[in-house]
């Protein structure tokens, strides 16, 4: 097991280039089984979630090789429609495989992806959408068995604009008979990226980014060489760390409109932010004023995946911030760890009241989930004195070269084996 040793108090200066977005690469990998021709995805980050998704593809019979930062997937010999249970446990987003495996094999079997570190994570919207496309679903013994001799286009209305459900339905509809219309679809940039990827394979998907997506089923999809969008959550994490510590960074690979809600809050905190194309420059003196309220919402609202990191910033902003987490049930695990650093955080259900304190002091911290772990690093970079962060397996799920990129910005952070 590894841990970070962080000596806080340094300002951050320099440049950060975004990794390809984790939450795009995962559905793109799932989509690669839709063709028996070669699929090349560029800039694939070396993170645990991606490695696990590649293991799942290998288990269903795909051949995968890494060429520098590219992943080359050959699904010609994919044979199995069963997603191995142990990997579903490891990777909740393996549920995205349902749609693409159904399109490829007209059958799919997956163990029920239980809840995870941040909440119950139901998949009722995935399953009701697939049923509308003609999928017969049997749920028993902790497994979900799907059968669809024929996938037929349908009108689908999502009760909630679920990212995963939107993606799964698109993947099941791309070769269905006829037209599928998904209303109240998720609008996240990763959905538009999946649309562009599929259309580059010969699919006919329109409207991603808006609330209604139309999929016209086609007979076959061909191979593709594709570069995904940059990881807006990764870049948002570096922007928050610099805003909190003070300094100046220039990020590239994520256009401002993909994290506009975060930039709006950081400007309210007193940061100077300039944007041009996919570049964002943020300047901060490290002495921030608080904003009154941050509520997480589906895109384009404030991203739930930025809530923990932003809350860490609020602990030393001048004033009190009310944080409301509207998407997941248990996304405040990090709060107890911040309190051990001297933060004044009170959590009641989905709401956290954060009163800014003069300073945080270093402590020995335990990461509890991916973005909560990143939040502890943000706080430790700001704190006076030395902190340790253990259980880095959570952070390794979503941040490639985290300590390396932070060190390049001037952070005093080391990764050591314990
Ligand atoms: C995706 O998860 C992301 N994961 C999450 O990022 C992100 O937090 C989330 O979208 C919201 O933006 C990937 O893309 C791999 P949802 P997903 O379905 O698809 C409810 C990270 O840190 N819901 O949009 O699972 C659910 O309970 C991860 O990178 C249902 O009720 O999110 C939640 O309240 C964490 N029924 C809300 O929708 C369903 O069938 C949002 O979930 C599905 C979801």
Image (tube, rainbow, N blue to C red):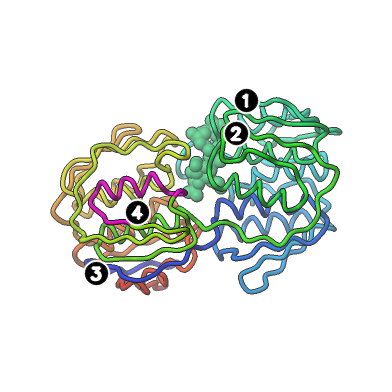
Q: Nearer the viewer, residue 243 or 402?
A: 243
SS state under label 4:
helix
* Residue receiving disc 4: 375
Q: As displayed, is residue 330 above or below residue 83? A: above
Residue in the picture at 19% in, 64% down: 384
Which numbered disc flags the more N-terminal residue, 1 or 2?
A: 2
The boundaries of the magenta stretch are 257-273
Confirm whether residue 288 shows in the render. yes
Front label number (4 vs 1): 1
Residue 103: quarter of image: top right
Q: Is residue 6 above or below residue 243?
A: below
Mark 3 or 4: the one toward you: 3
Q: Is residue 258 magenta?
A: yes
Query: CA gap, disc 2 to disc 3?
Result: 43 Å
Q: Which residue is mark 3?
A: 10
Q: Residue at x 57, y 32 (%)?
A: 211
Label 1 or label 3, whichever comes before in sequence order:
3
Q: Which residue is mark 2?
A: 123
Q: Which residue is mark 1?
A: 157
Is residue 301 on the magenta stretch?
no
The residue carrying mark 2 has its beta carbon less than 8 Å from ligand 1: yes
Q: Main secondary structure of the magenta part?
A: helix
């Amino acid at each position: 097991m590894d841990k970070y040793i962080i000596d806080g108090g340094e300002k951050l200066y320099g440049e950060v280039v975004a990794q390809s977005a984790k939450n795009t690469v995962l559905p793109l990998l799932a989509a690669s089984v839709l063709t028996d021709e070669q699929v090349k995805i560029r800039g694939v980050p070396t993170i645990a979630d991606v490695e696990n998704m590649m293991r799942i593809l290998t288990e269903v019979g795909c051949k995968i090789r890494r060429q520098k930062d590219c992943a080359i997937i050959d699904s010609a010999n994919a044979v199995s429609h069963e997603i191995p249970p142990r990997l579903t446990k490891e990777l909740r987003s393996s549920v995205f495989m349902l749609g693409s495996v159904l399109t490829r094999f007209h059958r799919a079997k997956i163990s029920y992806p239980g809840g995870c570190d941040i909440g119950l994570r139901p998949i009722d919207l995935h399953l009701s959408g697939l049923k509308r496309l003609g999928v017969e679903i049997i749920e028993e013994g902790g497994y979900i068995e799907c059968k669809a001799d024929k996938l037929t286009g349908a009108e689908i209305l999502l009760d909630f604009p679920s990212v995963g459900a939107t993606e799964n339905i698109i993947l099941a509809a791309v070769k269905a008979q006829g037209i599928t219309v998904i209303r109240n679809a998720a609008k996240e940039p990763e959905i538009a990226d999946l649309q562009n990827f599929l259309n580059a394979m010969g699919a006919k998907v329109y409207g991603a980014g808006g609330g209604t997506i139309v999929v016209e089923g086609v007979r076959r999809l061909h191979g593709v060489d594709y570069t995904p969008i940059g990881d807006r959550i990764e870049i948002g994490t570096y922007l928050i760390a610099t805003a909190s510590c003070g300094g100046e960074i220039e990020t590239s690979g994520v256009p401002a409109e993909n994290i506009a809600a975060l930039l709006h809050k950081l400007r309210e905190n007193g940061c100077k932010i300039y944007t041009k194309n996919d570049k964002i420059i943020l300047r901060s003196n490290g002495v921030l004023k608080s904003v009154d309220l941050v509520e997480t919402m589906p895109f384009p609202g404030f991203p739930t995946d930025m809530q923990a990191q932003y809350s860490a910033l609020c602990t030393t902003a001048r004033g009190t911030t009310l944080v409301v987490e509207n998407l997941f049930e248990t996304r405040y695990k990090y709060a107890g760890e911040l309190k051990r650093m001297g933060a004044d955080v009170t959590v009641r259900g989905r709401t956290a009241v954060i009163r800014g304190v003069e300073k945080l002091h270093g402590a020995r911290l335990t990461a509890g989930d991916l973005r909560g772990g990143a939040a502890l690093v943000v706080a430790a970079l700001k704190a006076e004195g030395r902190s340790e962060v253990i259980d880095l397996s959570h952070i390794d799920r979503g941040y490639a070269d985290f300590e390396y990129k932070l060190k390049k910005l001037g952070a005093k952070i080391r990764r050591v084996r314990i």
